[in-house]
Amino acid sequence: MQPPALPPDRLAEILRHAEAGYPEEVCGMVIGTPGLPDTFRVRPITNIANREPQADAGGGHRSARTAYLMDPREQLRVLREIEADGAEVIAFYHSHPDHDAYFSAMDRERALVGGEPIWPGPSYLVVSVMGGRAHGARWFTWDPAAREFCAAAAAPAIAQEQG
């Protein structure tokens, strides 16, 4: 599966969100009509990892500095928006402060239930933010044959997007 063709202004919006949230992780959704990038809209969602106890697979404590948890009320608001206008979830995104753009074990764990993706269609965009500046971004998509999230493509050059 190919990641969506995210318009440059939408990618720039996500990068600004990631930089503004530094040194914590940010998260959100991209919604719209598949195959029609002009309809894509970025919907930032509050990361509530500091309000809700977070633990990684090893039981270690995680905060918004190293994890994200989307506010369920805000997610519901976006899902209602989708339902009202016939859109779909195109992608989920989040940032990795002072780390590369990779799909972590925790990212995988949260994207799956019983070994299957909760959202089989949307891609995932992970943005690396180093020292407060977007450093890189990479798309991840579900590969049903491999039963894994695979790196699909690097997002277009970050420097170009920040113009």
Image (cartoon, rainbow, N blue to C red):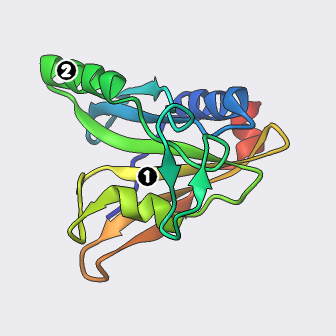
Image coordinates for residue 159, horizontal then vertical, percent: 78, 42
Callout 1 environment at 10 Å: few (<14), some (14 to 19), or many (20+)? many
Residue 161 in view, yes or no = yes
Mark with earlier residue (1, 2): 2
Q: Secondary structure at mark 1?
A: strand
Classify residue 117 as left or right of residue 47.
left
Image coordinates for residue 88, horizontal then vertical, percent: 22, 35
Name the residue rendered at 19%, 20% in the picture: 80
Quarter location, residue 22? top right
Work out whether residue 110 or residue 99 is closer to the camera in this orientation and state it.
110
Callout 2 environment at 10 Å: few (<14), some (14 to 19), or many (20+)? few
Classify residue 142 as left or right of residue 56.
left
Amino acid bearing label 1: Tyr
Quadrant location, the C terminus: top right
Name the residue rendered at 31%, 22% in the picture: 73
Q: Which residue is mark 2?
A: 80
| Number of residue marks | 2
Task: Tell me the tag on residue 124.
Answer: 1
Extreme right residue here?
A: 131
Q: Are marks 1 and 2 in contact (CB under 8 Å)?
A: no
Work out whether residue 100 or residue 30 is closer to the camera in this orientation and state it.
100
Image coordinates for residue 131, horizontal then vertical, percent: 85, 42
* Dot in front, 1 or 2: 2
Extreme bottom residue here?
A: 146
Amino acid bearing label 2: Arg
Q: Is residue 84 above or below residue 46?
A: above
Name the residue rendered at 81%, 37% in the picture: 132
Image coordinates for residue 112, horizontal then vertical, percent: 29, 62
Classify residue 84 as left or right of residue 99.
left
Classify residue 92 as left or right of residue 113.
right
Residue 155 in view, yes or no = no
